Amino acid sequence: MSTVNEAPPAAEKAEVKIVKDATCTFCGCVCDDMELTVVGDHITKAKNSCVLGKAWFLNHHTEDRPDAMIEGQPATYEQAIERAADILCNATYPLTYGLSDTTCEAQRVAVAITDWIGGCLDTTTSVCHGPSGMAFQAVGEVTCTLGEVKNRADFLIFWGGNPAESHPRHFTKYSLMPKGQFVPNGRKDRTAVLIDVRKTKSAKAADIFLQLKPRSDFELCWAMRALAKGVEVDTSIEEKTGISLETLTDLVDRMKKAKFGVILFGMGLTMTRGKHLNSEAVLALARDLNKYTRWAAKPMRGHGNVTGADNVVTWSTGYPFGVNLGRGYPRFNPGEFTSSDLLARKEADAALIIASDPMSNFSQPARDHLASIKSVVLDPKLSETAKVATVAFTTATYGINTPGTVYRMDDVPIPLRPAFESPYRSDFEILKAIEKRIREKQREKNG
């Protein structure tokens, strides 16, 4: 029978901690103004977060799994590190893939490991904004930070993306709604255009919605480039794109009169017909418009630190993804050295997968081959890829359990403030231990 002096539940005894200015690593916005209420090892409130951020923080829980698994059997970290080092050292053509949901510190170690073992290095960029990475290599980028967008941009074009659902706080914190130094009235001082093949929820927030025909992004952008340069465009552009020449002419005129414009483009541009040529066209359009006023173009990145992966791999090798280090120097060739293609051709004989789940989204031939080779997987959750791994490490979750650095989608580095510790090791600690053991084995082998 219950009494007044009955001891309170354990949850009520747990220490309550407030973590201010925490960083959300769910998407590329990397909002760093979270206020987290932590009770024991649970986050109970996530002030300032969007619906996706709340799901990221409030649904996080430490999984009851072994520290590591070797061929489906529980193992210690030391045993798993030894086996992982053996697999990677003895591989003829190893592959390192993932990296978009871990810290820059861990990414640097992954690059080093791939260099030591002479493997291929690829990130999730290759299956999302990889074409944009190729475009940057070809034509460059007129860039800016999200702080500049907030404080200066009076004309915004969202192309091939749906920020209202994919990046909910982008409109309110960085681009469309906030009051800035040179746009003091916020939304009232801005013109917003959405270009997409369908009317998404983001269309409600735009002043102008242009619904173009699928697979015609390149033609539309090239026509806009021509109009910006004063070149006559044939009226048949409407038949191709579904948008009239009159509408395009008016849009480009307004773009040339803007004080500070930004094109924010998503995967609807990079994962359709044209791919890197679409990205090149948008980047070139922003460059052309700088003859008249100030324009920039930025990709809308998805994963929390996929931009960091691009930066780390680029400053280490000179290329953003799909890099082969087998000859002792970096070679870049998307299609040959990118993971999905390499696995589909059955070329890799071992894989190191970090904070990614290719078994859930690669092509069937790539998945079949990945399941057939020896693999080392680092993931906080028991993903489909971890289930087929030879060695699977259970890791702490970056941003929630571990500190470090991540890059926002505008290439600005942001520090992480963890909410509580995890019983599991971080990606960085595990990768450092694997690297150390690989170097020891290589020295033993070489005498």
Image (spheres, rainbow, N blue to C red):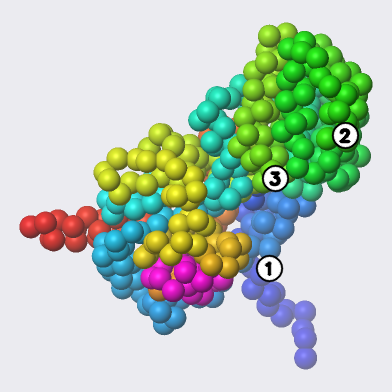
Residue 397: where, in percent of width, then height?
A: 53, 58
Q: Which residues make up the magenta segment?
A: 367-388
Camera sees residue 167: no
Image quarter (top left, top right, bottom left or bottom right) of the C terminus: bottom left
- Residue 394, horizontal then vertical, whole percent: 47, 67
Mark 2 and mark 3 in contact? Answer it, CB < 8 Å: no
The residue closer to the viewer here, 70 or 374, is 374
Question: Height in image: 339 above or below 82?
Answer: above
The residues bearing labels 1 and 3 have C-alpha atoms spaced at a distance of 52 Å
Find disc 2 in the rendering and name its residue: 239
Query: Eyeballing the image, is 293 above or below 80?
Result: above
Q: Amino acid at mark 2?
A: Glu
Q: Residue furthest bottom?
A: 1
- Report which residue position mark 3 lands on: 272
Magenta stretch holds residue 160 = no
**Disc 1 versus disc 2: nearer the observer:** 2
Position of 92 with respect to 1 (left or right) is left
Nearest-to-viewer mark from 1 and 3:
3
Q: Decide whether residue 386 is among the magenta residues.
A: yes
Per the image, the residue denoted by label 1 is 12
Image location (x, y in percent) of residue 225: 73, 20
Give the distance between the C-alpha atoms of the residues marked 1 and 2, in whole angstroms.
66 Å
Q: In the structure shown, which secondary structural element does the residue marked by tag 2 occupy?
A: helix
N-term-proximal mark, 1 vs 2: 1
